Each structure stands twice: as structure tokens, then as C-alpha cells.
Image (cartoon, grey):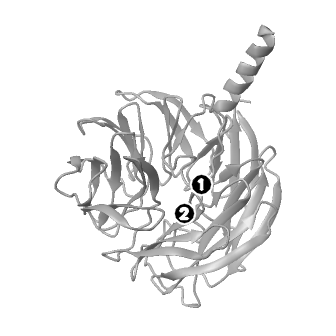
Amino acid sequence: MRVGLLFTMLVIGACCHAEDWPGWRGPRGDGTSHETDAPTEWDAASGKNIRWKTPVPGSGYSSPVLVGDSIFLTSCDPTTQARLLLCLDRASGKPQWTREVIAAPLEGMHKLNSHASGTPAADADHVYVTFFQTDDTSGKRGEPGEMIVASYDHQGNQKWLVTVGAFSSIHGYCTSPVLFENLLLVNGDHDGESYLAALDKATGDLVWKTPRVHQTRSYVTPLLREIDGQMQAVMTGSKRVAGFDPRSGRRLWWIEGPTEQFVASMVFDDENFYLTAGFPTYHVMSIRPGGVGDVTDTHVNWHVTAAQSYVPSPVVTGGLLFIADDRGIAHCFDTKSGERLWRERLGRHFSASLVTADGLVYFTTDDGETIVMKASREPVIVAENSLGESVFASPAISDGKLYLRTREHLFCIGNR
């Protein structure tokens, strides 16, 4: 009897830390994983801890999402101008199906963007994806078009495809949808009549659409958190930091600035929100939750300009905020004081956002090097790992494995 009970407890304990990675930055939208056996060492050249690698057709910088037995990924075939949704088998990496979501002229974009940069979102039954569609064939940056959002079931059957609104940006397109209850949230910040919108995930019908005040391009994915009993979608962009009611789209509070354009998603440690930004000036900021209306002068705990992190999103763990500076420099800040505890050059350039698991932080450079560091007040490198291929997508962690997309492949890395 005791043996049976012990076995049951061990099985439950083993399952508790195994998580799907269902959308941008994982199950909590902040790059954190509850996994305790994520790999720390690998090498593509020797095959060490490489469980499988699968060629990815086309090109794109979106990250993989994992639900159940499936991996979903977006790509673009530049020869046919098709924007693609791919499904792979989690265990083997074998392609299961590919669907053409839309075919449209390739938009102009920033050199660090792609035509498939938005990461999908998935639940147990469906996967949701968004792309930019235009009729303009010039390839010029900033030409007008529309945001397209589509839903597919896990067998690859399209359930709906809708146009949410106009979109135009000289940097190109990137929006990662976020699931909340029966809604799908999408950020439409662009160089025009910007908006934050929510669709009914079952039908694609527009539920609400909130205009953005300053109407300036940004590429931030909302972070969902409950504050004082109220769910909030918190995000930077449109020259502001703001919190919204995800059920109605009502703007709850905001902080003006601190800069014009934003890419990195925010993080939260159950006490405060943290942001990194941006362009044309760089900022790191701690924000106290709560408040109503303009809280610019009341809710900023600390604000420093010591890290130039525009694109990669940070992680917060153990009272420490870790930031990947675009220039290849890692930073660690004390969350209470804002003091920078250390900075270390780890590579040439960072595009990938950070992930953290089991007291470790994973920094992945554009050159495909992942430096695993202790989440500590001093810089301690645990391992340095190479895939030998360029990486612009962010890692995913699920069931003891780490998944990394390079320019050519999707890698599954694991100790078992």
C-alpha cells in the first residue's frame, strides 16, 4: 500500500514540472519555466544531447510553441510568397502537415525582422496565427496593408480567417497573439491608427478594439496578470506603459514614456512590473502595480538607463532582473533597488529573448551560442553551447527539453 502510494506521489511529482509551451514566452508569457531537468549542455557538431533536428522550410524568426504531441511554427516561402503554418511531431520532429495561411507580396522590413516573426498561440484544440497582408508589390518599407489572423485545429483544418485592421510599419510586421479565456488578444501598434484588439477565439469575431493614443510602431506582446483581483493586460508601446482590462479593452492606467518605440515584453515578479526599452533612448524600469489613470508620477519605483536592450525580453527570478543587451552584453539588476550588480559581454549580438528554469538563465546569441548562467548576484557561467547556425528566434522549454529554431533547423535538445 505504501509502495503504491509512493509510486503515485512520484508520478504526480514528475508530471507537475512538465509544462507545455503554448505561446510567446511560454505558459506565463514571461520566459519562466517550472522544469527542473532542462538541459544545460549540448553541442551540434558532436551531437551531444541533440535529440533531433528537423529542416524548417522557408524562413522566419518566430518561436516554436508546444501543446500535447504537437509543435507549431510559422514560416514564409519567399519563392511562392506563401505564409505558412507548420506542425511537427514533438517526439521525433517529423513534419505532420503544412498549411498556406495566405499568399501575398513580401513587405519591406527592417534587416533584423522576417516575414514570419509572430509566434503562434495554441490551446488543446486549436492554434492561432497572424500575418501581414498587402497588395503592394514594390517591397518598400512602410507600405499599407492589413493584419490577418487565422485559426486551425490540430489536424490542420482552417476554422476561420479574418482581417482585424490596417497595419503599416517601416520595420515590417510582428504580432504574437495571446489567449485569455474565450478571447484572442492581438497588438496592432503601427504607423497609423493603432489599436489593441480581442477576437472571439471560436469564431474570429471582433469583441473589442481599443485605439492607441500616440499611434506609433511597437511590437510588444501583452502580459496577462491579476492585480488586486482584476485581470490586466499590461504592455509597453505607443509611447506609454499601460494596463488594460482584457475582457473589455478598457484602459485602466498608464505611464507616459519612457521612450518612443518598444519591442521587449514586460515581466512581473508578483510585486512589480519590469520593462526594458527601446528606441531612440534606452531604459530599464520598475513599476508598482495598481492605480487608476495617469500614474506616471506615483508608480515608478526606479528608472535607470544603464542597459541598451531594445529587442530581447528579460526575465526576473529570485529577486534579480536579467537583461540581454542587444549588443551582446548580459546585465543583472537588483529588483528592489535598481542597482546593476554585474554586466558581462557574452557575444556579438542578441535577438532572442531570455528564458529561465531551475535557477538558471539562458542567453542565446545571434551566432547560435547559448550561455547558461546561474541566476545569481555574481556572473557565473555554467556552460557554453553551440549549434553552429544563426539564431534569431527565442527558446522554448517543455518536458525536460529545450527547443531552438535556427535559420535552417528546429533543434530538440535534452538530457533524456
Percent x, y of residue 29: 51, 50
- Pointer 2 residue: 176
How busy is the neighbourhood of tag 1: few (under 14 within 10 Å), some, or many (20 plus)?
A: many
Q: Residue type at mark 1?
A: Gly
Q: Nearer the viewer, residue 46 or 38?
A: 38
- Pointer 1 residue: 23
Q: Which residue ends up furthest to the top in the rendered image?
A: 2
At a point 50% along the width and 48% down the height, the residue shown is 365
Q: Count the marks: how many?
A: 2
Q: Nearer the viewer, residue 345 or 226?
A: 226
Q: Quick check: 265 above or below 271?
A: below
Tell me the number on the disc at residue 14. Answer: none
Mark 2–mark 1 distance (CA, rounded to whole Å): 8 Å
Q: Quick check: 125 above or below 371?
A: below
At mark 1, the secondary structure is loop
Q: Dots 2 and 1: beta carbons under 8 Å?
A: yes
Q: State left or right for residue 307 relative to residue 298.
A: right
Q: State left or right for residue 34 relative to residue 312.
A: right
Q: Kindly indicate the quadrant of the structure image that contains residue 319.
A: top left
Q: Is residue 135 visible?
A: yes
Percent x, y of residue 414: 69, 35
Q: Residue type at mark 2?
A: Ser
The N terminus - image quarter: top right
At a point 34% along the width and 51% down the height, the residue shown is 275
The C terminus - image quarter: top right
At a point 70% along the width and 31% down the height, the residue shown is 15
Q: Quick check: 281 above or below 5?
A: below
